[in-house]
Amino acid sequence: MKKIFESILSKIPKPDSFSLSWPPSVNFSLKKDKNQKNLSHFEHLVEKSSWVKEFIGHKEIWICESDNTFQIEIGDSGGGFQEPWVEVYPDRNGHRYPVYLKISNAIIKELTFIACDGGRIFVPIPERHLEQDQLIYSWCRSALALKVCKIIGHYYIYENIEGIADVSEIRITP
């Protein structure tokens, strides 16, 4: 009898979702979403969720309030950084930092941020390209790095990324 029962159950497909309705006025639905633990969903959470800064050990970690398995970790300094856009601040020395996007403690993406003006400013490294033999720095407003910067960035007296862009002569493109 047990074998017959197992045989019947093995032929029934497992649903991707199911709904319960009890009591009749309350609907409860659970749906499996296989794409919840990826970079695309991480970016969605960066844009739509609240994040909380914590210090765990000596690491600064930003934790997503809606799903604490999504975290942004600021790594250790990767050394000095010198470019003209950094040298416009009173402390002319910059430092490079890796910023890790993690899901369940696994790194899924690494970004590079620069600490300027003695650490009072913390922004993503801009893109570089030549225009008529002149080096141009730019940030793309829709880029993941700029979205992450809204959470972890420091702007000091310049208030926002646009203020930093004005002082450092960095273009912000759509």
Image (cartoon, rainbow, N blue to C red):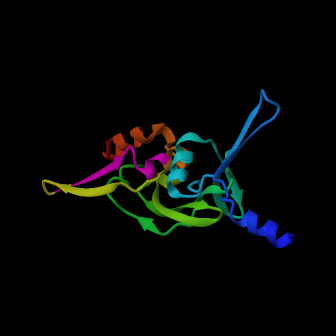
Name the residue nearer the viewer: 99 or 109: 109
Point 29% across, 52% down: residue? 137
What range is drawn magenta here?
A: 134-147
Q: What residue appears at the point 56 percent right and 40 percent down from the top-left corner?
A: 48
Q: Is residue 120 left or right of residue 82?
A: right
Tell whether 140 sits left or right of 131. right
Compared to residue 141, the image places residue 63 above or below, namely below
Q: Nearer the viewer, residue 8 or 141?
A: 8
Q: Residue at x 52, y 54 (%)?
A: 119
Which quadrant is home to the C terminus? top left
Single out the residue that lies furthest toward the bottom: 3
Q: Residue at x 45, y 57 (%)?
A: 114
Whether the magenta-drawn stretch holds residue 118 is answered as no
Q: Where 27 falls versus 119 (above or below)?
A: above
Q: Position of residue 172 (x, y in %)?
A: 33, 43
Query: Where's residue 148, x and y in %?
Result: 50, 49
Give the position of the N terminus as an image quadrant.
Answer: bottom right
Q: Position of residue 161 (x, y in %)?
A: 43, 42
Q: Is residue 58 left or right of residue 131?
A: right
Would residue 65 be seen by someone viewing this image from the given angle? no
- Residue 102 in percent (x, y) is at 59, 61
Front in this rendered view, residue 125 or 91? 125
Query: Which residue in the rendered view is the most extreme toward the left?
Result: 132
Report the residue that reaches farthest toward the top. 25
Q: Nearer the viewer, residue 16 or 47?
A: 16
Q: Quadrant of residue 116?
A: bottom left
The mark tally for this picture is 0
- Examine the image and state in which quarter residue 49 appears: top right
Is residue 74 in view from this perspective?
A: yes
